[in-house]
Image: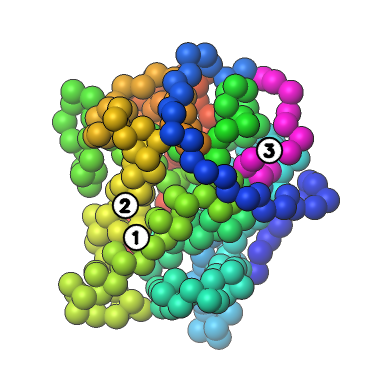
């Protein structure tokens, strides 16, 4: 089932996706409070996912409320948003209703048992259909979502992504194959953006390749941490995002290193790329602010309490 807390009476209608702009725009100013757009491109919806196990009777176990302790920050900072906590049954229902005519996605999602892989795929499917802001349950909101996009970009931004890792001149980090990697613990998007159908298809193909390599089935697939990263997780997500960014600026973006060291929100076509502190503050790398302070550019924080690696 879905668990919804509705501050507004009606969910925003799905927006049509418009053609990708070909001219990147670089911000030279920080986000400031401005008049709230009454009809934003990115719907005022917050999505989180929490899968629970089934008991011996087949019933789903209760969610430990301590694991939702950070959720209050999202509600407090965004009182006019619709909040949805998607559980195991709700995820199954969402995919069945919206992807009944897409057999590869429907079959793959139904067969997956690994909660990390399944949660990854579901977030892309939700944002593809409904749009809004997806964020992991171990994230804490620092700024209202309405303030995430600089005012001059609000009528053009249809996706907001943040940098998780930027190698700069330092060493590579464990399990991160790229010089720069985008996080997928928090993503904001308008519905219908091609990035998410591209990512979902990429994930499905990668999962079936893992099945072939391990000579197993999707329900029995035991993926390693790096295999999760590269099939449905942030490494695969980074590849999908960068493909879209290159469509907006094929000359200026030839390598992920071209994005290294950005210090301001940067708009490529309709995808807003945030600097490291936007979604990635508090980390011991990438020039992320990690001195106990909360920088002005920090919109949220990931606390890295997820347990999918253990499953």
Few, some or many residues within 10 Å of mark 2 (<14, 14–19, 20+): many
Q: Is residue 198 above or below residue 256?
A: below
Q: Look at the image and tell me whether residue 279 can be seen.
A: no
Q: Residue at x 61, y 30 (%)?
A: 154
Of the 4 image quadrants, the one containing the C terminus is bottom left
Left or right of 309, for residue 94 = right
Q: Is residue 103 above or below residue 64?
A: below
Q: Look at the image and tell me whether residue 232 can be seen.
A: yes
Stretch of the chain drawn in magenta: 33-44
Instruction: Give the residue number, with chain letter if any, for mark 2.
Output: 236
Few, some or many residues within 10 Å of mark 3 (<14, 14–19, 20+): some
Instruction: Give the residue number, with chain letter if any, for mark 1.
Output: 202
Few, some or many residues within 10 Å of mark 1 (<14, 14–19, 20+): some
Of the 4 image quadrants, the one containing the N terminus is bottom right
**Alpha carbons under labels 1 and 3: distance apart:** 29 Å
Q: Nearer the viewer, residue 31 or 24?
A: 24
């Amino acid at each position: 089932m879905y668990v919804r807390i509705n501050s507004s009476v009606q969910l925003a209608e799905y927006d049509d996706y418009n053609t990708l702009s070909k001219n990147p725009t670089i911000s030279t100013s920080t986000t400031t409070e401005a008049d709230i757009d009454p009809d934003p491109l990115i719907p005022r919806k917050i999505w989180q996912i929490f899968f629970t196990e089934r008991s011996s009777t087949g019933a789903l176990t209760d969610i430990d409320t301590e694991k939702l302790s950070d959720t209050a920050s999202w509600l407090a900072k965004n009182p006019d948003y619709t909040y949805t906590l998607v559980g195991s049954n709700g995820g199954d229902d969402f995919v069945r209703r919206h992807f009944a005519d897409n057999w590869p996605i429907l079959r793959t999602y139904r067969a997956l048992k690994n909660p990390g892989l399944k949660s990854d795929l579901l977030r892309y499917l939700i944002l593809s259909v409904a749009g809004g802001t997806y964020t992991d349950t171990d994230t804490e909101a620092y700024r209202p979502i309405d303030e995430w996009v600089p005012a001059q970009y609000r009528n053009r931004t249809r996706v907001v992504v943040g940098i998780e890792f930027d190698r700069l001149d330092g060493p590579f980090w464990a399990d991160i194959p790229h010089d720069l990697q985008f996080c997928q613990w928090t993503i904001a998007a308008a519905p219908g953006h091609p990035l998410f159908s591209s990512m979902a298809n990429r994930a499905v193909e990668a999962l079936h390749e893992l099945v072939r390599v391990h000579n197993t089935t999707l329900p029995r697939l035991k993926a390693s941490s790096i295999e999760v990263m590269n099939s449905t997780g942030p490494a695969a997500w980074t590849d999908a995002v960068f493909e879209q960014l290159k469509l907006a600026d094929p000359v200026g973006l030839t390598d992920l290193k071209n994005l290294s060291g950005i210090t301001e929100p940067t708009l490529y076509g309709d995808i807003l790329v945030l600097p490291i502190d936007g979604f990635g503050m508090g980390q011991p790398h990438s020039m992320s602010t990690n001195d106990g302070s909360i920088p002005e550019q920090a919109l949220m924080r990931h606390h890295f309490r997820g347990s999918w690696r253990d499953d």
